[in-house]
Amino acid sequence: MSELPPKPASRPDGAGIVQRIRLFRQDMFASQPERLYRAKMAEMRTPFYRSFLVNTPDLVHRVLVQEADNFPKSEVLADTLRALLGDSIFATNGEQWRAQRDIINPAFKGCPRQAFAQMRAAGEDAIARLQGAQQPVEMEFVTSYLAADIIFRTLFSKPLGETRALAVFEAFRAYQKTQPLWNIPALLRLPRWVPRMRSKQARHHAGVIRALLGDLVAERQAEIAAGTAPDDLATSLMTAVDPQTGKGFSPQEMVDQVAIFFLAGHETSASALAWTFYLLATHPDIQDRVAEESRLLSSLPAPGDMSALRFTKHVFHEGLRLYPPVPVFVREAAVETQFRGRRVPKGSMVLVSPWYLQRHENLWENPDAFDPDRWETPNGKARKRDAFIPFSAGKRVCPGAGFGRIEGVLMLAMFLRAFRLEPAGNVPVPVAHLTVRSKDGIYLSLSPRV
Ligand code: HEM
């Protein structure tokens, strides 16, 4: 099959404000005009707020890197996720964020290497579960379970199959179904006392997740005190201290951080893997090249094998380009400024979207095509430097980027060594939930590769 990979329909021309808000609440992509795939920037004015989408490499660089302090994370996302994530690193700003980041950075040094064995074990278990499974399989569930298993093993040195861990995973899935990405009162800048449209169920699921994670954190604290704790990410995080103040996380803060690691560490990778498997299923020639390359993996894959998987790495990058798991980064202008000569009032919302930047018609050749070989071309190499931001950039860049890259490439190679993939069911429609997901699942048939 060589047709273009699925892309959501844009907003119909002439849609009014009410229709736009309704579409926005359904799905961010459906509410945006087609011209964002060509625009350098876009300004949206409503009676309540102004927002600016910046869509050129230089403007994106200004917001994320050069002037990052003038564009802190917006309260919108924090407000949406507070019930679940408390004051976790993902949403904080200023001194509070700096202290959190200084604590987690050392915990991540060398982490991918340590985590490799956990990734491999989770991958082997996933492959064993799929051998003999009823076909077709829903790949978003498969990759969510797999990525949750990987991050859980890396954090707590136990597989997700353990009863309590499984309950956390199930509560996360239920939470995502009930919690919309966008919180309209926050978006409209209404005061904190105005009730947020959080469903009762979302609050309930958030409470279940936090209670379960609280138990795991308390247990680990006891093990650290007794000197019996395993050497894993949870122990690193719980024993690390801020180099400037000498303080570590309190137990409550620890629950916030574990919650964001679990969420950010599996939801993103699961989305990237599910879409990349779909791309491979619909491009058998490319799939065969990945399968061929996967023969370079040792029978028990080792970190040293990774450098040989050059084409598989391009495939993973191309999946991240077409389906960046985090479709938009939401910032706020802390000072009045200008974009392309246009006044940007203080308090405006500033959006950076890897989705639109990485499919921009003026930047990429054949932007909607799945073409992993583009990463070897001069245009691909240049765009990788200035217009490829699936992990963001600057000081808020994803600390799990190295981890996520190794995990993605290793899982692609291990799965393609074991299975041939074929599309089964309807063409999936991308929608922007917490991450880019498919509206009705991604169904594939997996058969043993002999
Ligand atoms: C393919 C995999 C992944 C992708 C595409 C991804 C993407 C991102 C992006 C885009 C951000 C910044 C969002 C923003 O600026 O608004 C981010 C932040 C973050 N990610 Fe990842 N991520 C991935 C994997 C992981 C993993 C495996 C972990 C942990 C093990 C992780 C932990 C975090 C944390 C803690 C933050 C917040 C950092 C801060 O604000 O200082 N991510 N990620």
Image (cartoon, rainbow, N blue to C red):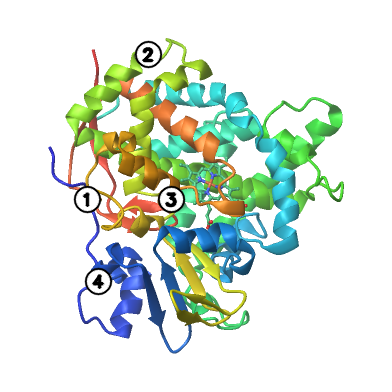
Residue drawn where x is 28% and y is 50% of the image: 364
Circle 1 is placed at which residue position? 6
Residue 369, relative to residue 20: is it above or below? above
Q: Left of 199 or right of it: where is 362? A: left
State how many labels appear: 4
Circle 2 is placed at which residue position? 296
Q: Report x, y in % for residue 428.
A: 23, 49
Mark carried by residue 11 = 4
CB under 8 Å between discs 2 and 4: no
SS assignment at label 4: loop
Residue 33, relative to residue 191: is it above or below? above
Q: Left of 215 or right of it: where is 128? A: left
Q: Left of 15 or right of it: where is 413? A: right
Q: Give the distance between the C-alpha atoms of the residues marked 1 and 4, in whole angstroms.
A: 16 Å
Earlier residue among tags 2 and 4: 4
Earlier residue among tags 4 and 3: 4
Q: Report x, y in % for residue 80.
A: 54, 66
- Mark 2 CB within 8 Å of ligand 1: no
Earlier residue among tags 3 and 2: 2
The front one of 50 and 48 is: 50
Circle 3 is placed at which residue position? 386
CB under 8 Å between discs 3 and 2: no
Q: Report x, y in % for residue 417.
A: 32, 19
